[in-house]
Amino acid sequence: MEKVIEINNARIFQQDVCVLDGVNFTLKENEFVYLIGKTGSGKSSLLKTIYGELPLNEGNGSVAGFNLNELSKKDIPLLRRKIGIVFQDFQLLMDRTVGDNLLFVMSATGWKDKSLMLKRAKEVLQLVGIEQKMNSMPHTLSGGEQQRVSIARALINKPALILADEPTGNLDPETSSEIMQLLLAVAMEEKTAVLMATHDMTMVEKFEGKVIRVENGQLHEVTNISAFNPAL
């Protein structure tokens, strides 16, 4: 299987402070990996490095075919076309319809043909089960529906990788389970790797995936999740 992310012997900095040291991390296509750890442990710094917000100055890394060590400013938008990001707070544009939210992203990432854009928008909404909401305004949707739109938006460019940052953080347990099932199904269907940062240990226990814990500036694989206490 192809490696979507490969980071070796990396040190990751926020300004001049080293937040992660000795980072060795690989994510393959179709793989689903949880990233867990306390707030401030460095999860977000790792995600920001992966999508080019933080530079990788020490160690080696590649994401979706892009060398992180040689990433120029003009490369970053191209890298981000290969990555779909799902946020905790949905980050939808509230002044336009669901369909127009998707078309906006497509325009921003270089799509030109309106008929192809509409076709792809319908495809991804169908994939997440809300094609009937194409002309709805986001504020009329439930939290779960808004997160489905967010996942649809992440899938627009057929990304090699989805980064999900606390995607169930604002949802009730039942809706969280639906969103997790959807993410897993979509990853399988689209052959997309998923890296999901989360505090929701119920979801981690319920849905299978590799678990990486960020602690004391290091990444550790957790092999026995049932014995793991996130509070410690």
Image (spheres, rainbow, N blue to C red):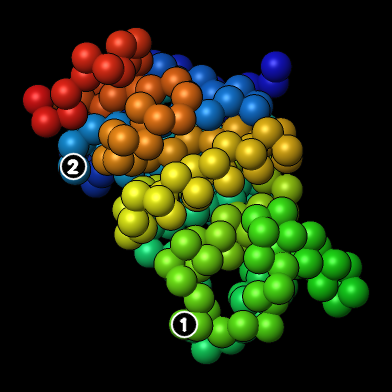
Q: Is residue 131 left or right of residue 7?
A: right
Looking at the rendered structure, the secondary structure element under dot 2 is loop
Q: Nearer the viewer, residue 200 or 221?
A: 200
Cα separation, mark 2 vs mark 1, equals 31 Å
Label for residue 40? 2
Vertical order, 198 against 26 (above or below): below
Nearest to N terminus: mark 2 or mark 1: 2
Res. 139 mark? 1
The residue under label 2 is which amino acid type?
Gly
Q: Is residue 231 left or right of residue 172?
A: left
Q: Nearer the viewer, mark 2 or mark 1?
A: 1
Q: Position of residue 157 (x, y in %)?
A: 72, 54
Indicate the quadrant containing the N terminus: top left, top right, bottom left or bottom right.
top right
Figure check: 167 above or below 185? below
- Disc 1 secondary structure class: helix
* Amino acid residing under circle 1: His
In which quarter of the view is residue 101 placed?
bottom right
Occupied quadrant, residue 31: top right
Residue at 65 percent across and 75 percent down: it is: 133
In the rendered image, which quarter contains the C terminus? top left
Let me know if residue 219 appears in the view. Answer: no
Extreme-front residue of the structure: 174
Task: Please report the residue visible at 57 percent of the width from the left and 56 percent of the height from the top.
Answer: 151
